[in-house]
Image: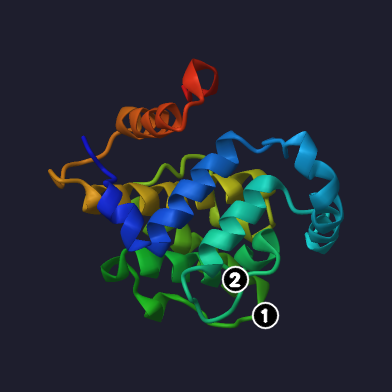
Amino acid sequence: SKFVTPDNIVAGSPQLNLAFTALLFNNFPALEIPQEQAAMHSQEFAALMEEEDAEASREESVFRNWINSMGLSADVNSLIEDCRTGQLLVEVMEKLQPSLVNWKMVKKDTKVQIKQIENCNYAVQVATDMGLTVVNIGGKDVADGNKKLILALVWQLMRHDTVRLLEGLGSDKGKVSDADLIKWANDKVSKCGRGGGGRIS
């Protein structure tokens, strides 16, 4: 299927640019600066890295930037900590699929731990309703700040958003499978002249 056309790129869709950049960043995180440019950019790069939270993983940075691009009620500074109340996850889910969220089930801005766990339980329930895989993910895991499980859940939300975007751009408006995503990414890599060495599997 042809999910992205030259017209899509020329139009400058922010969501398309974000999805494609995140895909490149996740799969090719160690792109090297050409040697002749290294000296020129080394100071700029060092300054940029100093600003980045030393504790944040590459995945956290990508997910945080993705969520911040949505224009939610507040910016995300620490992905794991900000997810622990459950409210942020529900806000993201509402952006992706508004009809599924019932805000009467959410205790907003609560500091009470048991209510935060209830929010997280509801977020897991909504994720299930969205068709995401939440086996072994419980509300208490999220409220406790289980990094691995929170990243797994947010990754599925971002993937859901990316697939929805590609389906909307596709000429046949059909469902996008994992195989379709891999083929699309490999086609883009091949057209950039990277050859077989940069293929995604």
- In the picture, measured across the screen, residue 158 lies left or right of residue 76, that is left
Taking the view exactly as shown, the residue that stands out farthest to the left is 172
Q: Is residue 194 left or right of residue 178?
A: right
Badge 2, how many Cα within 10 Å: few under 14, some, many 20+?
Answer: many
Q: Is residue 141 visible?
A: no
Does residue 50 appear in the picture of this structure?
A: yes
Label 2 vs 1, first from the N-terminus: 1
Question: Which residue corresponds to the image point at 72% horizontal and 36% vertical from the top-left?
Answer: 34
Image quadrant holding the N terminus, namely: top left
142 shown above or below 76: above
- The amino acid type, in three-letter code, at marker 2 is Gln
Instruction: Classify residue 152 as left or right of residue 166.
Output: right
| Residue in the image at 15% along x and 46% along y | 171
Residue 37, above or below 130: above
Say what secondary structure mark 2 lies in: helix
The residue at the point 44 percent across, 51 percent down is 19
Numbered badge on residue 116: 2
Residue 184 in the image, given as x and y percentages of width and height: 34, 34
The scheme the figure's colours follow is: rainbow
- Are dots 2 and 1 in contact, CB under 8 Å? yes
> Does residue 150 appear to the left or right of 130 in the view shown?
right
- Residue 192: percent from left, percent from top: 46, 32
Q: Residue at x 42, y 42 (%)?
A: 133
Q: Position of residue 128 (x, y in %)?
A: 37, 51
Disc sitting over residue 30 in the figure = none
Other residues around mark 1 within 10 Å, as few (<14) / some (14–19) / many (≥20) = few
Q: Residue at label 1? A: 111
CA gap, disc 2 and disc 1 = 7 Å
Q: Amino acid at mark 1?
A: Lys
Residue at disc 1, secondary structure:
loop
The answer to which of 69 and 132 lies nearer the viewer is: 69
